[in-house]
Amino acid sequence: GDRTAADRLARLRRVLEQQEAPAGSPDAQATRTLEVFKAIAECRARFGPGAVGPYIISMTQGADDVLTVLALARWGGLPDSGHVPLDVAPLFETVADLAAAPNVMRELLAEPYYRAHLAGRGMHQMVMIGYSDSNKDAGIGASRWALQRAQAMLVETTDRAGGVDLTFFHGRGGTVSRGGGKITSAILSAPAGSVRGRFRMTEQGEAINAKYGLRGIAMRTLEQTVSAVALATALPPPRAPDARETDWSGIMDAIARDSRATYRALVYDDQQFVDYFRLATPIDVIQRMEISSRPASRPSPPATSDLHNEIEQLRAIPWVFAWTQSRHLLPGWYGLGTALDRAAERHGAKLDDMMRDWPFLRALIDDVEMVLGTADLAIAARYARLAGKLGERYFPVIRAEFDRTVANVLALKHEAALLDSDPALQRSILLRNPYVDPMSLLQIDLLERWRAEGRPDNEVFRALLASVRGIAQGLQSTG
């Protein structure tokens, strides 16, 4: 309601410490939530305490969000010997929430009731960080830097709180835009002290078969991950950054700021860009497909349901999936070219030092290079024609930023062509793309016909669904 966060915290402390019962009878939504906790209690009673993992709180914005879960768990029948037997993992997703995460955790770990709860859980605290929403919100450069900084500051916060064992749970998607990319370099480029023998991540349904479908490949995936975790754990403990690292952080702050401004100027601040997105990608087909575990869009409050807000409400999976299908792959690179251009003008040779000696920047550039290598702007230009005048307006802007990003990545990696440093992947894309191109051209034709007919549920729509699946298989990438 209208209560401030401080009011809510005071009320929750009272509820938890005095074991108050809920005031009044719960409404339908509250009843559904309480049923979840009853199901957790039943599941644990039948199959043991390890049967249910941490309770993840999406879009966490304050310590009160975490204490609310403990109160609901208590009311839902989970109390046991004075503390709630449930690990609670706050999930920080947007760039703003990631920046606020250390303060939220500092406040939470200072709560006496929560400290007692943690003591009952062996002082293990899990924090989940989201890659997809931060990328959709601010573009890849700002997103990755926000994630890196949040991890470093959360390590510092929990270390200062004393006795807390922190585990990061990485909400990584299958694609680079949603946190995918090479797992080994992701682990080894994480901030000092953020691994410590423990690493947890999500694996997307579409990536399971590729990484675990055959015994040999599953063993290799496990071996690479365990090896990277062991190496990261053996690295020296966190220390105060030296002058060079402080300088690099300042440069990266500027790169993140410039890339975010460039990305948001196009995606959010230009009112007509949503219309280009709607016409130049098959988002209207994807929204009618039954994919992923959640609806394509978040529910929008009536007061905010305008076109400008449409991209805000769309979930990250269909957003990335649509750009992948239309071969733009825009969320995986847009904005970084302009930012790197400016950084190169200001800092020149320092960027080469950063690439050579800083695993974070190297991992970011490698991931962006992989996206640029997979994108095909010749095919994307054909999709842009579906948007008519909007295509003529926006595609040259997209093409110019793409070329800028490619030029900067090649300069930083001292390569003549994209993926020269990864010939196996380079060859794989060169072999795959000619098979995908005819499917893309067919999809463009089908989209034109289907939209002209008023988007009916007919044979053309079923052919479109088949084209979406075919392109996803060919590119080995969805959302």
Image: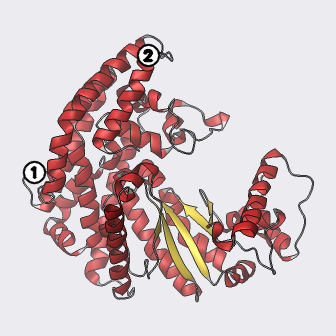
Cβ atoms at labels 2 and 1 below 8 Å apart: no
Q: Which residue is located at x 37 percent, y 49 percent?
A: 261
Q: Classify 221 as above or below 258.
A: below
| Percent coordinates x, y for residue 240 in the rendering | 37, 86
Q: Amino acid at mark 2?
A: Glu
Quadrant assignment for the C terminus: top left
Outermost residue on the right side: it is 24
Answer yes or no: is residue 267 visible: yes
- Residue located at (33% from left, 34% from top): 470
Residue topped by disc 2 = 459
Give the mark, 2 or 1, whose residue is nearer the N terminus: 1
List x then y, in percent, for residue 219: 35, 68
Q: Quadrant of residue 55?
A: bottom right
Q: Is residue 450 left or right of residue 262?
A: right
Residue found at the very far front of the displayed protein: 215
Badge 1 crowding class, 10 Å Cα cut-off, few under 14, some 14 to 19, many 20 or more, is some
Q: Residue at 60% of width from left, 57% of height from top?
A: 58
Name the residue beneath numbered marker 1.
Answer: 417
Determine which quarter of the picture holds residue 475: top left
Residue 403 at x, y percent in the picture: 18, 43
Visible residue check, residue 396 = no
Q: Secondary structure at mark 2?
A: helix
Disc 1 element: loop
Task: Name the kind of residue labelled 1 in the image.
Answer: Ala
Name the one closer to the observer, 187 or 223.
223
Q: CA distance from mark 2 to mark 1?
A: 42 Å
Rendered view: 437 above or below 160: above
